[in-house]
Amino acid sequence: MDAATAPAREEIVRLHEVRKVFNPGTSIEAEILHGIDLTLHRGEFCAVMGPSGSGKSTLLNIVGLLDRPSSGTLAICGEETTQLDDPALTRLRGHNIGFVFQYHHLITAFTALENVMMPMLGAAGFPNAEMYERAQTLIASVGLTPWQDHLAGNLSGGQQQRVAVARALAMKPALLLADEPTGNLDTKSADAVFELLRRVNQEQGTAILFVTHNPELAQRCDRTIQVIDGMVSG
């Protein structure tokens, strides 16, 4: 099959001329992102690198629909988002985007299984057998079945981050945003979490933006996006 007849890959993220200005019209106005163009397709695993203060977190917050661009357009799974109201953004985010942060943000008084169920419970409003079964499957996929009924606060750092990955996958998102998920882990645990994300990417076709300061992990991604002074390349 040549390039002219090959099917187009599904676009999961498209940013066009996205700018972000904080405190506009004041003496402390600051433009953090300067006309970002970025496309991410289904099944892509992209590292995001750049120095502190370069705009990586701002970019991730906008892609994750946690913040709005000051100008430009953002489409998630083919849906233009810049004119959506907050409830519509919440629905789109909840069904299409998973998050894994440097700090796992688990509810330590809940078990590992209960933490994984939380996104599904938030969407459905009440627990059911299907939800419980999916949470068990996800816990098994990250190798934590023996610990599923342990309180999250009693798990190791690497185990907690694996629970966070499982939780991020609860709604079968098309996009996973990982903001330095290995930053607080030892080398062995960091490698295990990275390999878990890679397996999810390959087996489920989940597109992943993986923010990291680790060049060795970045080299194992499909491509690297450099964010420098609010502009991107790669």
Image (cartoon, grey):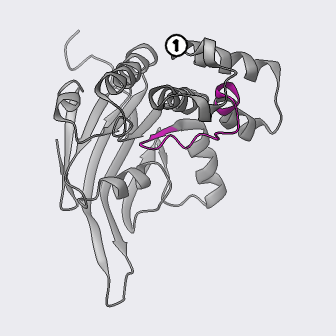
Residue nearest the viewer, comparing 160 with 35: 160
Residue 128 within the magenta-colored segment of the rendering: no
The amino acid type of the residue labelled 1 equals: Gly
Question: Where does the image place residue 212, in percent across and percent down from the top left?
Answer: 27, 40
Q: In which image quadrant can residue 101 be found?
A: top left
The outermost residue toward the top is 1
Residue in the picture at 45% in, 34% down: 175
Q: Is residue 207 above or below residue 66?
A: above
Residue nearest the viewer, comparing 54 with 155: 155
Q: Does dot 1 land on a helix, a strand or a loop?
A: loop
The outermost residue toward the front is 154
Left or right of 203, for residue 98 = right
Question: Where does the image place residue 129, in percent across and percent down from the top left?
Answer: 81, 18
Q: Is residue 182 above or below residue 75?
A: above
Q: In which image quadrant can residue 183 be found?
A: top left
Residue 108 within the magenta-colored segment of the rendering: yes
Question: Where does the image place residue 37, in percent across and percent down from the top left?
Answer: 26, 51
Residue in the picture at 62% in, 12% down: 146
Read off the magenta span.
98-115
The residue at which mark 1 appears reads as 143
Left or right of 49, for residue 193 = right
Q: Is residue 169 above or below residue 179?
A: above
Please rate how many residues cluster around mark 1, counting C-alpha atoms within 10 Å: few if below 14, some from 14 to 19, many from 20.
some
The quadrant of the rendering that contains the N terminus is: top left
The outermost residue toward the bottom is 27
